[in-house]
Image: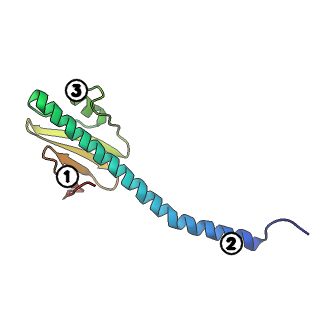
Amino acid sequence: MKKGFTMLEVLTCLVIIGALAGILLPRFTTTTAKTNQRLAESNLRAIRMAQKMFYARNGLYACSSACANAAAIQTGLGGGDSINLKDGTYVYSMLSSDATHFTATATGGSANLTVNQDNAWTKGGVAYTPS
């Protein structure tokens, strides 16, 4: 008696594995995108809180000129570990148009996210309430 698998058994296994991959792969990429967006929302909340603290100490918001990346935002907010940002899936930027207004942006992922000093959020330019 010979040992081994027949061609039919091997093909059946490949079809089953292919079907499972077809079902699970889109779900995995959607979950990854949602996770990255939640991280971006969390980082924007941290930027907003750091800006509020900076405003309480200094009477104006940081980055009167644009802060173009995470490192510039951290430096503009006083450096140190007050906020721990890293550009990755999303790239962070911030602009204070005057002493009493700012907009923080996370660019990338599924859509650009923004928050301002009044905690008004947008996603892709449309009003948005983060979860």
**Is mark 3 in CB contact (under 8 Å) with mark 1?**
no
- At which x and y percent is residue 2? 89, 67
- At which x and y percent is residue 121? 19, 52
Q: Kindly report the distance in space between the C-alpha atoms of the residues bearing marks 1 and 2.
A: 50 Å
**Is mark 2 in CB contact (under 8 Å) with mark 3?**
no
Dot 1 falls on a residue whose secondary structure is strand
Q: Which residue is mark 3?
A: 78
Kindly indicate the quadrant of the structure image that contains residue 71. Answer: top left
| Residue at image location 51% in from the left, 67% down from the top | 23
Image quarter in which the C terminus is found: bottom left
Q: Which residue is mark 2?
A: 12
Which amino acid type is marked by label 2? Answer: Thr
| Residue at image location 35% in from the left, 37% down from the top | 86
**Mark 1 Cα within 10 Å, few/some/many (few <14, many 20+)?**
many
| Residue at image location 22% in from the left, 56% down from the top | 129
Q: Kindly report the distance in space between the C-alpha atoms of the residues bearing marks 2 and 3.
A: 61 Å
| Residue at image location 25% in from the left, 34% down from the top | 73
**Front residue of this view, candidates 76 and 121:** 121
Does label 1 or label 2 sit earlier along the sequence?
2
Which amino acid type is marked by label 3? Answer: Gly
**Front residue of this view, candidates 6 and 64:** 6
Rendered position, 131 above or below 94: below
- At which x and y percent is residue 112? 27, 52
Q: Kindly report the distance in space between the C-alpha atoms of the residues bearing marks 3 and 1.
A: 24 Å
Does label 2 or label 3 sit earlier along the sequence?
2
Residue situated furthest front in the rendering: 131
Residue situated furthest right in the rendering: 1
The tag on residue 121 is 1
| Residue 63 in sight from this viewpoint | no
Image quarter in which the N terminus is found: bottom right
The tag on residue 82 is none
| Residue 80 in sight from this viewpoint | yes
